[in-house]
Image: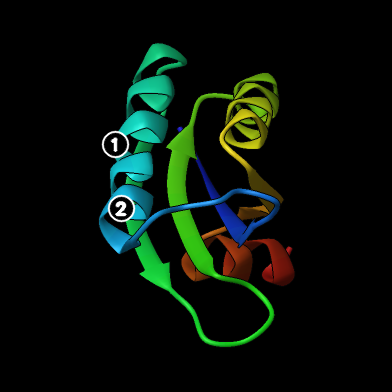
């Protein structure tokens, strides 16, 4: 599986409290399971973005599905593929 990182903005969503926002991640996790993806880490951020989501997904199509699901929940995701530094190093050597 490939590793993906998403910078997430809570965009246009209205939450009553932090508990409601936290429960949203449970909903997103369920949708991830449906597309055979898995959250590895989630961080709350200070600054322009609200969260960093690190997850594994089998392919780019699955990532598009996740982005659409997140948008339905009022989240805006900027997603990029992550390459382990060890693998990146081997690419540079070639």
In the image, 77 versus 75, the foreground residue is 75
Q: Picture quarter containing residue 29?
A: top left
Q: Whole-percent x and y of residue 80?
A: 69, 53
In the image, 65 versus 57, the foreground residue is 65
- Label 1: how many residues lie within 10 Å, few (<14), some (14-19) or many (20+)? few
Q: Going by the picture, which residue comes out furthest to the top? A: 34
User: Which quadrant is home to the C terminus?
Assistant: bottom right
Numbered circles on residues, count: 2
Q: Residue at x 60, y 48 (%)?
A: 13
* Placement of 21 over or under 45, stated as above or below: above
- Label 2: how many residues lie within 10 Å, few (<14), some (14-19) or many (20+)? few
| Res. 69 mark | none
Helix, strand or loop under label 1: helix
CA–CA distance in space, label 1 to label 2: 7 Å
* Placement of 43 over or under 91, stated as above or below: below
Q: Residue at x 69, y 54 (%)?
A: 11
Please give the residue where the numbered disc 2 appears in the rendered image. Answer: 22
Q: Left or right: where does residue 62 sit relative to residue 76? A: left
* Placement of 3 over or under 19, stated as above or below: above
User: Which quadrant is home to the N terminus?
Assistant: top left
Please give the residue where the numbered disc 1 appears in the rendered image. Answer: 26
Q: Are marks 1 and 2 in contact (CB under 8 Å)?
A: yes
């Amino acid at each position: 599986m490939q590793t993906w990182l998403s910078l997430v903005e809570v965009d246009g969503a209205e939450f009553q409290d932090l508990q409601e926002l936290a429960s949203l991640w449970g909903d997103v996790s369920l949708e991830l399971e449906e597309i055979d993806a898995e959250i590895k880490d989630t961080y709350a951020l200070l600054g322009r973005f609200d969260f960093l989501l690190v997850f594994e997904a089998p392919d780019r199509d699955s990532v598009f599905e996740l982005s659409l699901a997140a948008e339905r929940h009022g989240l805006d995701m900027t997603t990029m593929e992550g390459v382990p530094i060890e693998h990146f190093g081997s690419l540079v050597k070639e």
